[in-house]
Amino acid sequence: MNRLVITRYNKAIVSALFEGMDMVQVSLNPPSEEGILGNIYLGKVKNIVKNINAAFIEIENGRICYYSIDENPNPIMAQGYSEGQEVDTSSKKNLKIGDELIVQVVKEDVKSKAPVVSANLNFTGKYAALTYGKSSIGVSSKIIDEKERKRLKEIAARHKGRDFGIIIRTNAANVPEEKISSEIVRLIASYENLRKYGIYKTCFSLLYRTPQNYICDLRDSYTDNVDEFVTDDIELYRNMKE
C-alpha cells in the first residue's frame, strides 16, 4: 500500500511518500508565511543595471528581487487592460525606474542572493499548467505513449491563447478530456482575472499566493499510485480535505 504522510516537525511541515514500509520521497517545508516561491506580486522597478541587462524589483515587505530583462520581453505593466485584449509580442518593453509590473517569484533568496522574479507567469493545476509569455503547447515527457500524447496535445491546443501556452502534466495521462478541459478553463479564468484587476492593485500587493507545498504534494501525487493520505494534525487534515 502506498501512502502520503503529512505532519508537523518544529513548526515545519513534512511530507513523506511511502511505498509499503519504504519511504521513497520526503520534503521539509517551512511555515506558509515564510515561503514566497510561486507568489505573484505587483512590483516596482527600483534600479536597472544596464551592463547585465537586469533590474531590481521591490515586492511585498520591502524585498528586493533580481529580474532579467532579456528573459522577460513582455511584462504585464500596471496600465489599462480590457477583457479580450491580446498582447503585442513583437517587441520588448523598455523598463524604467518607477515602473510597476506583475511578477512571480521563481527562486527564493539563498544566503546573500536575492529572490528571482519573472514576468513569465505560471498557473499550475493537477493536469495542466498555463504559461504566460510562452505560447507553446507541451506534454510531459513522462507520458510516452504517442497516441495519448497526440490526444493530450489536441486538447491543449483547443485552449491555447496568443499570449499564453498550455503544458499538459503527467497526471493527465488517460484522464477524460472533460476533466482536463475544465481545469484549463479555470486556469485561464485565474490568469485573465489577474491581468484584468491585478494592474489596479496597490503597488507591492500580493496578487496570488501559491498553495503550500504539502497541498502541492497532494495535488501532484499520482492518484492511481497513492492509496491513503495520512495526517495527525487537525488543521492539516481540514486543509487536505478541502
Image (cartoon, rainbow, N blue to C red):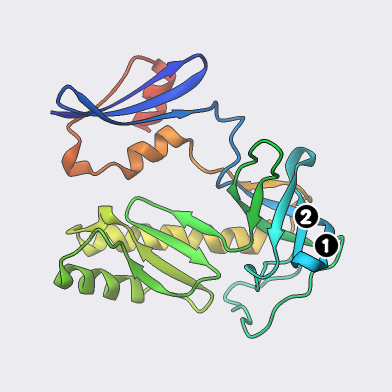
Q: What x and y, as percent, mark residue 204?
A: 76, 47
Residue type at tag 1: Ile
Where does the C terminus fall, quadrant-wise? top left
- Counting from the top left corner in percent of width and height, residue 79 is at 76, 68
Q: Position of residue 141 (x, y in %)?
A: 28, 62
* Residue 48, label in figure: 1
Proximity of marks 2 and 1: CB atoms separated by less than 8 Å: yes
Note whether 26 is above or below 103 in the view shown. above
- In the rendered structure, which amino acid carries the disc numbered 2? Phe
Disc 2, SS = strand
Residue nearest the observer in this picture, 222 or 114: 114
Q: Is residue 23 visible?
A: yes
Q: Residue at x 56, y 60 (%)?
A: 121
Q: Residue furthest bottom?
A: 90
Secondary structure category for the residue under label 1: strand
Which residue is under mark 2? 56
Q: Which mark is residue 22?
A: none
Residue at the image position 78 percent from the left and 74 percent from the top: 94
Left or right position of 12 against 149: right
Q: CA distance from mark 2 to mark 1?
A: 6 Å
Q: Is residue 129 left or right of residue 180?
A: right
